Image: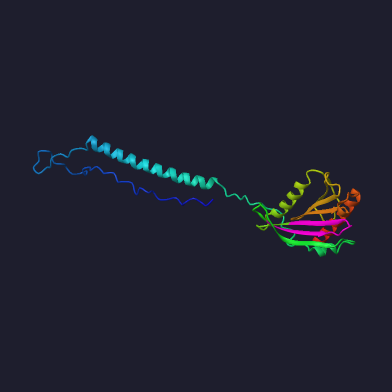
């Protein structure tokens, strides 16, 4: 809040000067009423005149009181309301770029053919971040397939920590159900296995690290059911290759 306006001088000007009553000088005899040339006695101030003077004084004092009230009001509001900041703070964004799909593939062996590699902006309803997505898919007939999807949340205001908050929120949202913690995924802040009860041909790993969240998926050859322990082992290897490529 900006400080209030400085105190103003009394807007009503100087107070009116009250008339001074005359008094005879001491030490000189005063002529009597019958003395030639003596002016007729002055009439004293009437009750009406005195009443008007008192009313005028009250109006001036009242006006000053109103002015002082508003000045105190302005001063009170500016002194009592301390400046506050609602800006969030947090760790700086860990990542500014996402790795390429070939970089991830180079850390694996026996991968199917790379069929999809797409890096593009992603939509988001969060006004504090911008979002980029990376989609990599390896598949061939007769072989298990794998995919990596990464989302990098970049804070629009440096130092706000919004990027990491978004990545963590993404991870927590998709690991609320049918998930099992994966505590030893190298490079990840948090990771979990995610299962799909309605799809026995699929297993997945979710993780987040800094301002990046990721989903790793492995599916059986030609959509066939998989050995879940082997599927999870392959998904973990692909997840570790991804975090290593991220650096």
Q: Nearer the viewer, residue 65 or 184?
A: 184
* x 28%, y 40%: residue: 53
The picture places residue 56, in percent across and down from the top left corner, at 30, 41
Above or below — where is 118 with respect to 164? below
* x 86%, y 47%: residue: 200
Above or below — where is 74 with respect to 141? above
Q: Nearer the viewer, residue 135 or 44?
A: 135
Q: Is residue 247 visible?
A: no
Q: Nearer the viewer, residue 90 or 245?
A: 245
Q: Quadrant of residue 245?
A: bottom right
Most extreme residue toward the left, as rendered? Answer: 36
Magenta residues, dominant SS class:
strand
Q: Is residue 6 magenta?
A: no
Circle count:
0
Q: Is residue 58 visible?
A: yes
Q: Nearer the viewer, residue 246 or 18?
A: 246
The picture places residue 74, in percent across and down from the top left corner, at 47, 46
The picture places residue 220, in percent across and down from the top left corner, at 87, 52
Colour scheme of this structure image?
A: rainbow
Q: Quadrant of residue 153?
A: bottom right
The picture places residue 228, in percent across and down from the top left corner, at 89, 48
In-image side of 86 versus 229 (left or right): left
In-image side of 66 versus 170 (left or right): left
Q: Magenta span covers which residues? A: 130-151
Q: Is residue 137 magenta?
A: yes
For the C terminus, the quadrant is bottom right
Above or below — where is 115 with respect to 9? below
């Amino acid at each position: 809040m900006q400080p209030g306006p400085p105190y103003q001088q009394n807007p009503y000007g100087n107070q009116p000067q009250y008339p001074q009553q005359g008094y005879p000088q001491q030490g000189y005899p005063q002529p009597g009423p019958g003395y030639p040339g003596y002016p007729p006695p002055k009439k004293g101030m009437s009750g009406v005149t005195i009443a008007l003077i008192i009313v005028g004084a009250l109006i001036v004092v009242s006006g000053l009181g109103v002015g002082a009230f508003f000045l105190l009001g302005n001063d009170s509001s500016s002194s009592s309301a301390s400046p506050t900041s609602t800006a969030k703070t947090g760790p700086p964004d860990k990542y500014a770029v996402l790795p390429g799909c070939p970089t991830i593939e180079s850390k694996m062996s026996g991968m199917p053919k790379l069929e999809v590699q797409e890096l593009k902006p992603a939509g988001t309803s969060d006004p504090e971040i911008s979002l980029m997505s990376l989609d990599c898919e390896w598949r061939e007939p007769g072989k298990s397939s794998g995919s990596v999807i990464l989302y990098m949340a970049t804070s629009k205001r440096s130092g706000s920590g919004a990027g990491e908050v978004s990545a963590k929120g993404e991870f927590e949202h998709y690991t609320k159900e049918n998930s099992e913690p994966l505590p030893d995924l190298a490079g990840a802040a948090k990771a979990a296995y995610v299962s799909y009860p309605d799809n026995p041909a699929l297993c997945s790993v979710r993780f987040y690290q800094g301002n990046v969240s990721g989903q790793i998926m492995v599916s059986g050859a030609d959509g066939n059911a998989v050995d879940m322990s082997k599927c999870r082992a392959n998904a973990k290897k692909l997840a570790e290759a991804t975090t290593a490529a991220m650096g």
